[in-house]
Amino acid sequence: MTGRDLLLGLTEVEPEFLVEAENRTLPQRRIFRRPVLAAALIALVLILVGCTYAVLSETEWFEKFFADWQNQELSESQNAFVEEHIKVIGQSITKDGYTLTVESAIADSYNAYIKLRLTSENGGKLNAESYLPDYRFREDGTWEQYFYALDNPEWKYITGMGPSEEDPTVILLRVNQNERQNAKPLEEGVTYRIHMTGLVGYYSDGSEEVLTEEDFDFDIVFDTLYNETLEMISEPITASFADIQVNVTSLKLRALSITTDYNGRTDEKGALCFVDSFVVLKDGTEVSFRPYILGSEGATCFLTGPVDLEEVDYVRLRDGTKIPVPETEKSPG
């Protein structure tokens, strides 16, 4: 397995996953039995949707990214969320004739999407299929972190990255706070380090080119973070798919993700109960779940588009169960 395979290793549930699930099996490549390899692969995951972004503003870029991932135009409240929470950064570093720029980011306290762009200062053509940092292990056997709090590097975040299919010079880094490892949520005013370990170009014929082995380190601070969490259930409910059933004890909705806790399984198949599930907004917009951390006691899911919790009407699970927004107020963090 190459470094690029690791960086682009997929753990988001894809259509073929659903086909295999109908036969009561999970694809073996998604069940990692070696803990170290599992952590590495789960950490490095992101599916990007190909679009042409060259003439778009940073706000428009993210609006289009989410719209394509969501398979429908963003609603008025979703566009407003992007416009309010986009952070234009514009930090650049040049190494060996290649400039990497952190252009912008959008985040809540549990998730962040950070957009970087590569340019060549020495006239070299950037015509590879993708450009990604090298995948490196330290002497102690742990892998290099791509994102961490500068003063608390022991807080490890899940990171994944990939290129835009139409613009391979764009690298989108996704950061997630891992509740199942009790990692600390992202915080306003904290300095975070983006650590890109060199740059490698990957070509469609399978060849690779090392552009530079020099590291790119950027320090960023989130001025404002959407930090609200909505617990959707006050007592356990049942979620099911085929002959799979789980007892859901918590379903926490945030602007960019949803986390479920459940029992009743000893394997990862409980996550199938949340595939083809949706957050439904008051205007009828449906934002789908994409499970990416699977476990016997719960699953964490991407949302394919941002949601303002004030605009949520209900959650609809795969088995048709509708969970309305509770009467209680949202909680911070």
Image: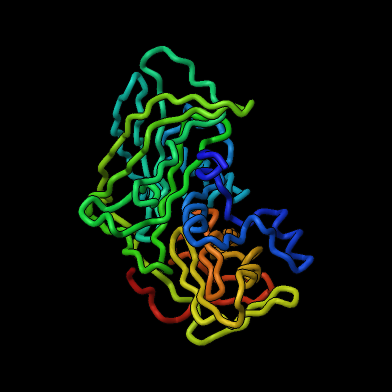
Q: Residue furthest bottom?
A: 235
Residue at 32% x, 70% y is 332
Residue furthest out toward the front? 139
* Above or below for 235 versus 206: below
Q: Horizontally, is 10 left or right of 226 in the view?
A: right
Mark yes or no: residue 227 visible. Answer: yes
Q: Nearer the viewer, residue 38 or 229?
A: 38
Which of the two residues, 209 or 103, is positioned nearer the viewer here? 209
Residue at image position (41%, 28%) is: 118
Position of the C terminus, as image quadrant, is bottom left
Extreme residue toward the top, this view: 123
Residue 81 visible from this viewpoint = no
Residue at point 38%, 56% (across, down): 157
Q: Count the marks.
A: 0
Residue 256 lies, in percent from the top left, at 46, 58
Q: Quadrant of the N terminus?
A: top right
151 relative to 201, above or below: below
Left or right of 1? Residue 18 is right
Query: Colour scheme of this structure image?
Result: rainbow
What x and y, as percent, mark residue 18?
Answer: 72, 60
Place of residue 312 in the rendered image (x, y in percent of width and height, measured from the top left): 50, 67
Residue 171 vs 191, above or below: the answer is above
Image check: 221 left or right of 143?
left
Q: Residue 295: x percent and y percent?
A: 55, 69
Residue 172 is drawn in which quadrant? top left
